[in-house]
Image (spheres, helix red, strand yellow):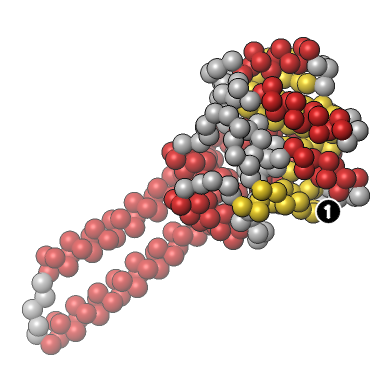
Amino acid sequence: MLSVVIPAYNEEKLIVNTLERVSNVLSDANIAHEIIFVDDGSQDGTWETIKALSEANENVVGVHFSRNFGKEAAMFAGLEKAKGDAVAVMDCDLQHPPKKLPEMYELWQEGYEVVEGIKRDRGEESAAHRAGAGLFYKLMSRATGFDMSNASDFKLLDRKVVDTLNALPEKNVFFRALSYWAGFKTTTVHYSVADRESGESKWSKRKLIKYAVTNVVAFSSAPLSLITILGMITLIVSIVMTVIALVQKISGAALGGFTTVIILLLFIGSIIMICLGIIGIYIAKIYEEVKGRPKYIISEISGR
């Protein structure tokens, strides 16, 4: 059986259409399936819609969070509740095409344990968003050692991979990177990002920046290495300025001391504050992990 995990946040208008599209594709391909909608603390009628569908359709399961915990938590909640031999994860807005699911399922039947959905393009995005996403994935690719430039959350995992991910103890997780990290026998399918059929993206610029920072910190120590680089830059600048000051002292040339001192103080102070900020982010994430709170809290489950 194939389990399809679909996180949803304020997607009341799309739930029914998404269920029909996914269910029809899998039924036409004669694939036994269950569809798990995870409501990430929506403020509209998303949960009521999911609950009604789960009560009317035995193949639908609804999971409702007590509040908004984020997409990563919703995906892992779906992985935990999935009962299938293989588990696919996709977005509720249908930008991940359901028609690719049978192809991914066939590759799984051939023996592949991870089937990664790779974007041919990023769809309609602003230049700023495209540039920011490109920078983020370059950093993640360098940190992980895998090419994640066109990676997505659209993927199919074998049961052993799902069990491996569910056993990970950390709270701050990055699903699309962890599937690369886990290894196993992997292949890819390519797809074009479709336009949203209804509603608007729930990702504001602030949320995207926070999401990027959290995932970089959760999966890489590269920012900590940046502190060493900044320290070396500061040392080099200090040596250069020292040499200049000594040469001017020996040659008897007047040194404009006030401006030089102010510039140096501002430069060194900025470097120190950047370094403290990076360390502070990591300490905050360590603090969250040490508290041992769960990734999410489920308030209600409907269906099955």
**Amino acid type indicated by mark 1:** Lys
Q: Quadrant of the N terminus?
A: top right
Is 24 on the left-hand or right-hand side of 94? right
Q: Name the one closer to the observer, 28 or 201.
A: 28
Q: Which residue is mark 1?
A: 185
Q: Position of residue 69 (x, y in %)?
A: 57, 28
- 136 w.r.t. 172: above or below: below
* Nearer to me, 225 or 63: 63
Q: Is residue 167 visible?
A: no
Helix, strand or loop for disc 1: loop
Instruction: Judge left or right: residue 227 versus residue 147.
Output: left
Of 108 and 14, the residue lying toward us: 14
Residue at point 14%, 82% (across, down): 249
* Residue 12 point in image, percent of width and height: 60, 21
Residue placed farthest to the bottom in the image?
251
Q: Which residue is located at x 66 percent, y 35 percent?
A: 94
How far across and down, in percent of the image, does residue 52 sit? 71, 12
Residue 266 seen in render: yes
Could you tell whether 281 is left or right of 260 in the image?
A: right
Taking the spot 65% from the left edge, 59% from the top edge, the residue there is 147
Residue 3: quarter of image: top right
Q: Is residue 179 above or below residue 94?
A: below
Residue 264 percent coordinates (x, y): 23, 64
